[in-house]
Image (cartoon, grey):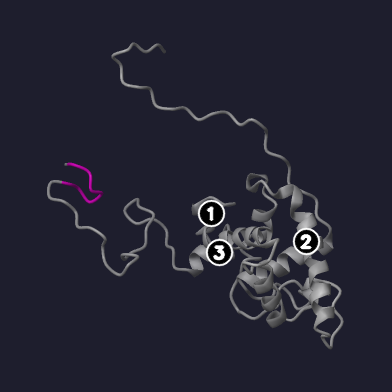
């Protein structure tokens, strides 16, 4: 397609990726437990089974782990998939150092060995503004939260369908399927509509 000097500028096109997305990393069982325990500290949930050591079980509803935190953390689209295994190893190391310094009564060989209260205390320190590695730990917390409140690894329709996704943060927060073709809450997010429909427009705000 050609363009002369009098023509309006063409809309920009999306540039191709300079590098293909990678593959999901292969994690050890220990790494999976560490990452899940961290995600559960950020958005706690119910245990999946009685022997679940990753989830502390301080809530009786699905948390970040059941809602797919590990799927999001290992998704190549995040750009951190190559490093999540190392993050998990570092988390366990930091937990051992933290517990040793505080002479906790029970032995701690990994982050998941900490009780929920101590997990929270350590995560608070890891994300403290003075922590040199805070950006790293904020990323892990961010993606864990996203799994719960936006389900970026799923189609929205699937996240809202109990038959497809048994555990869904979107459903837990009250996000409902579309009404009249619109994905929206049934009331204004601020408790009132942000603007009234203008005269001469339809229900979607488009000119009649």
| Relative depth, front residue between 157 and 52 | 52
Give the Cα distance between marks 1 and 2.
29 Å
Considering only vertical position in the picture, is 90 above or below 207?
Answer: below
| Relative depth, front residue between 125 and 53 | 125
Q: Sequence order check: which comes first, mark 1 or mark 2?
A: 2
Q: Secondary structure at mark 1?
A: helix
Q: Residue furthest toward the front?
A: 130
Image quarter hosting the N terminus = top left
Q: Sequence order check: which comes first, mark 3 or mark 1?
A: 1
In this rendering, which labeled residue sits more in front, label 2 or label 3? 2
Residue labelled with disc 1: 158
Considering only vertical position in the picture, is 113 above or below 142?
Answer: below
Q: Main secondary structure of the magenta part?
A: loop
Give the Cα distance between marks 2 and 3.
25 Å
For residue 11, side relative to residue 121 (left or right): left
**Residue bounds of the magenta highlight:** 201-207
Q: Position of residue 152 (x, y in %)?
A: 56, 52
Residue labelled with disc 2: 88
Locate residue 38: give its quadrant. Answer: bottom right
Q: Is residue 202 magenta?
A: yes
Q: Is residue 50 magenta?
A: no
> Residue at (73%, 74%) from the top-left corner?
49
In this rendering, which labeled residue sits more in front, label 1 or label 2? 2
Considering only vertical position in the picture, is 59 above or below 36?
Answer: below
Considering only vertical position in the picture, is 90 above or below 46?
Answer: above
Residue labelled with disc 3: 168
């Amino acid at each position: 397609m050609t363009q002369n000097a009098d023509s309006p500028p063409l809309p920009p096109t999306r540039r191709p990726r300079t590098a293909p997305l990678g593959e999901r990393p292969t994690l050890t069982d220990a790494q999976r437990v560490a990452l899940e325990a961290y995600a559960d500290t950020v958005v706690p949930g119910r245990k999946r089974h009685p022997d679940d050591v990753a989830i502390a079980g301080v809530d009786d509803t699905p948390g970040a782990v059941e809602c797919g935190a590990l799927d999001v953390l290992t998704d190549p689209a995040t750009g951190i998939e190559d490093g999540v295994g190392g993050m998990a190893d570092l988390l366990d190391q930091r937990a051992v150092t933290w517990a040793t310094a505080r002479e906790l009564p029970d032995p701690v060989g990994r982050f998941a060995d900490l009780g929920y209260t101590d997990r929270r205390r350590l995560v608070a320190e890891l994300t403290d503004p003075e922590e040199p590695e805070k950006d790293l730990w904020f990323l892990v917390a961010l993606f864990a939260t996203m799994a719960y409140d936006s389900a970026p690894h799923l189609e929205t329709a699937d996240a809202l369908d109990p038959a497809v996704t048994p555990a869904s943060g979107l459903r837990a927060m009250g996000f409902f399927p579309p009404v009249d073709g619109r994905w929206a809450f049934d009331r204004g997010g601020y408790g009132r509509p942000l603007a009234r429909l203008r005269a001469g427009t339809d229900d979607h705000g488009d000119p009649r």
